[in-house]
Image: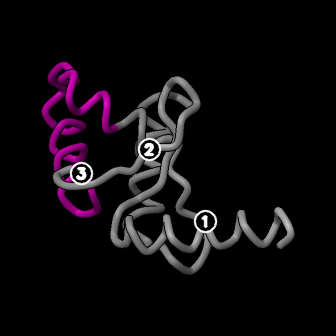
Amino acid sequence: MKLSSLERRLEDIEEAAYAGWIPSIDANGMRVWIKDRGCGIKFLREITRWQHDGSELSQDLQKQVNLWARAEVDGANFGEISRMNRQVSRDVLGL
C-alpha cells in the first residue's frame, strides 16, 4: 500500500472520529480540535459580547481566539460561522 493511501485513510478515520469538531493548530504547531463551548455560534456570541464590552480578554477566551485564528475551515465541510470565527479571531489578534 502506498504511503499516500495510508495517509488518506488515516485522515478519513480522524475526520470521522472528530466529526463536528474544528481542526486547528496550537501554539506548538500540533494539530488540535476546537470543541464544546468553543465551537460555532457560542464562540461568536462570546467574542462579539467581549468586543462590545471593552473588557479585558479572559485567558479562556484568549485561548479560543488563538485556536480559531489558526482554524482549518476552508472548504465545503465547514460553514460560514466557522469562517467568521476565524476571521474575527484574526482581527482580534491583528493578523
**Label disc, if present, on residue 10 of the rendered structure:** 1
Could you tell me residue 84's position as x and y percent?
43, 59
- Measure how far apart labels 3 and 1 are at the Cα level: 29 Å
Please say if 55 is above or below 8.
above
Q: Residue at x 24, y 49 (%)?
A: 38
Closer to the eye: label 3 or 1: 1
Q: Residue at x 70, y 70 (%)?
A: 8
- Measure how far apart labels 2 and 1 are at the Cα level: 15 Å
Pointer 2 residue: 32
Q: Give the secondary structure at mark 1.
A: helix
Crowding at label 1, few (<14), some or many (≥20) Cα neighbours within 10 Å? few
Dominant secondary structure of the magenta stretch?
helix
Please say if 55 is above or below 50.
above
- Measure how far apart labels 2 and 3 are at the Cα level: 17 Å
Q: Residue at x 20, y 29 (%)?
A: 60
Q: Which residues are magenta?
A: 38-64
Q: Earlier in the sequence, mark 3 or mark 1?
A: 1
Tell me whether circle 2 and circle 3 mark residues in contact (CB < 8 Å).
no
Q: Does 77 lie within the magenta span?
A: no
Could you tell me residue 63's position as x and y percent?
31, 30
Q: Nearer the viewer, residue 30 or 24?
A: 30
Q: Which quadrant of the view contains residue 29?
A: top right
Crowding at label 3, few (<14), some or many (≥20) Cα neighbours within 10 Å? many
Q: Give the secondary structure at mark 3.
A: helix
Pointer 3 residue: 43
